[in-house]
Image (cartoon, helix red, strand yellow):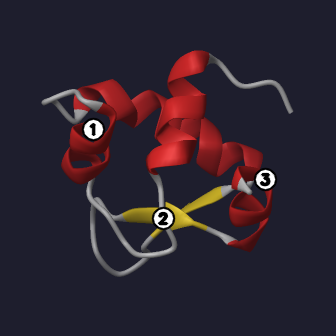
């Protein structure tokens, strides 16, 4: 899987716990969630991250993403 620099940064900022885009962006050093929205969508499509189904706007690594991150 080939990732852009933004996608790699978002992947490294994600954890196994649920996080909002604002929390993820602050870990990378950006103050707006819009920086991470598109990379998050790509990571979800690639199967390494997931969106919390019952709560809007929370994301985390899934087990496959955790394996890639390590």
Image point (72%, 73%), residue name: 63
> Can you tell which mark lies on residue 25?
1
CA gap, disc 1 and disc 3: 20 Å
* Side of 45 relative to 52 (left or right): right
For label 3, the residue is 68
* Among numbered discs 1 and 3, the one appearing first in the sequence: 1
Residue 43: x %, y % from top left: 62, 43
Query: Dividing the image into 4 quarters, which one contains the N terminus?
Result: top right
Q: Residues within 10 Å of mark 3 (few under 14, many from 20)?
A: few
Q: Would you name the residue on which mark 2 appears?
A: 15
The residue most toward the left is 31
Residue 9 percent across, percent down from the top left = 50, 32
Whole-Å distance between the Cαs marked 2 and 1? 13 Å
Determine the secondary structure under disc 2. Answer: loop
List the single residue furthest toward the front: 70
Q: Residues within 10 Å of mark 1 (few under 14, many from 20)?
A: many
Mark 2 or mark 1, earlier in chain: 2
- SS type, badge 3: helix
Q: Looking at the image, how many numbered discs can be counted on the residues?
A: 3
Q: Are marks 1 and 3 in contact (CB under 8 Å)?
A: no
Identify which residue is drawn at 37% across, 72% down. Answer: 18
The image quadrant of residue 33 is: top left
Quarter-wise, where is residue 47 in the image?
bottom right
In front: 48, or 15? 15
Quadrant (top left/top right/bottom left/bottom right) for the C terminus: bottom right
Considering every residue shown, the one lying at the far bottom of the view is 54
Q: 28 or 44, which lies in front?
A: 28
């Amino acid at each position: 899987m080939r990732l852009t620099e933004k996608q790699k940064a978002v992947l490294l900022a994600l954890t196994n716990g649920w996080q909002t885009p604002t929390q993820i962006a602050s870990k990378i050093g950006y103050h707006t969630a819009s920086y991470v929205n598109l990379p998050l969508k790509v990571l979800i499509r690639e199967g390494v991250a997931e969106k919390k189904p019952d709560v809007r706007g929370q994301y985390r690594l899934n087990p496959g993403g955790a394996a890639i991150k390590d």
